[in-house]
Image: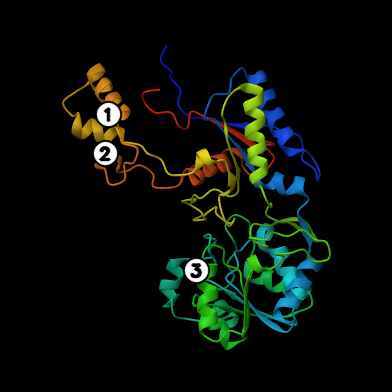
Amino acid sequence: MERKVGTVSRGIRCPIIRQGDNLAEIVVSSVLEAAEAEGFSLRDRDVVSVTESIVARAQGNYASVSAIAEDVRAKLGGGTIGVIFPILSRNRFAICLRGIAMGAKKVVLMLSYPSDEVGNELVSLDQLDEAGVDPYRDVLTLERYRELFGENRHPFTGVDYVQYYGDVIREAGAEVEIIFANDCRAILEHTKNVLTCDIHTRARTKRILRQNGAERVLGLDDILSAPVNGSGCNENYGLLGSNKSTEDTVKLFPRDCGGLVEEIQSSLLQKTGKHVEVMVYGDGAFKDPVGKIWELADPCVSVANTPGLEGTPNEVKLKYLADNDFKNLSGEALKEAISGRIKEKKDNLVGDMASQGTTPRRLTDLIGSLSDLTSGSGDKGTPVILIQGYFDNFTN
């Protein structure tokens, strides 16, 4: 009988993960128990995705704000530092900011506007237009920002992040000055020691600052890139991808996940005879059309993955074939013609008009985004996702 269902994404419930847990064993048993309970079977090329959060928890990859402060003080001198381009997030950045401020005498906080890197707005484009402000050139003081735009609370959290971040710095014992600019060089009028907190543009920001006279330039990826007094760390990403754990600790991005995905794949093959692909995923990459927020606050979507998830989709567009190559066919004849074209498609469709309109993104980014949307970030209790049929097409 012809299959009537394509891709299915299932959230798999798991126990609460604690430091030291055998995560590979828990993931495998949770998937197999779910399959038995719900009456489905694993197939070759299914995908098991594991959220980075439980990997870091199992690894015990945590750090205190005092460890952050010590690293910042040692690397940036402990005097006046510029902290530029942070995202606006209580969970993602506020506790990091507290540790950063504890490691400085004064923080010059430079916020990008009208929004941060992931789309959280300080002001709207309409407000900028009405005020005659050019965000590409104009540098605003806090006083000028308030004069023009007053208080602006985040539409979802209700937080005035300008006030909130200023309070965090002051409560940590540092002086604070807040400015608004989108040219990283503006911070050099205030200090030559800079911590740039952007995520996906950090390499360019560092380069521009160094070329224009900065003395010490670090990114969040350079803070806690090695342990401080026995703390957790991340050699590649430092504080990037971290989340608030308690009022005094952060959970860092997980480390060395390649062995985990291979172990899960090997165990499932041994237990089921099926070759399943596995990945550890962070934030997906998608935009909320109302709040205008990009989800991608982690440094990458795929922390680690098995080799079968490398590459990009190699698909033809069914509606293109139906409206062009086979526009005079219908019914069973149309179905057979399209099926034949799919079976005969080349291994690489780059530049082929029949593939236009298919999503030009890496498989890991697409599957990671689907996984992130399925798992959510609250109380669903499904930190593992099983995706079936993703690599199927119209002929399967």
Badge 2 is on which residue? 354
**Residue 276 falls in image quadrant:** top right
Q: Crowdedness of circle 2 by 10 Å Cα count: few (<14), some, many (20+)? A: many
**Separation of marks 1 and 2 at Cα, in angstroms:** 10 Å
Specify the quadrant that holds the C terminus: top left
In the picture, the disc for residue 114 is: 3
In the picture, the disc for residue 376 is: none
Mark 2 or mark 3, which is nearer to you? Answer: 2
**Separation of marks 1 and 3 at Cα, in angstroms:** 48 Å
Q: Residue at position x 77%, y 40% from top?
A: 17
Badge 1 is on which residue? 341
Q: Position of residue 44 (x, y in %)?
A: 53, 26
The number of numbered badges drawn on the structure is 3
Q: Is residue 195 above or below residue 319?
A: below
Q: Position of residue 320 (x, y in %)?
A: 25, 36
Q: Residue at position x 24%, y 18% from top?
A: 331
Tell me the kind of residue under disc 2: Ala
Q: Is residue 10 rendered to the left or right of residue 232? A: left
Tell me the kind of residue under disc 3: Pro
| Discs 1, 2 touching: Cβ within 8 Å | yes
| Residue projecting furthest to the left | 328
Mark 1 or mark 3, which is nearer to you? Answer: 1
Residues 92 and 362: in front is: 362
**Mark 2 or mark 3, which has the lower sequence index?**
3
Secondary structure under badge 3? loop
**Mark 1 or mark 3, which has the lower sequence index?**
3
Q: Crowdedness of circle 3 by 10 Å Cα count: few (<14), some, many (20+)? A: many
| Residue projecting furthest to the right | 229
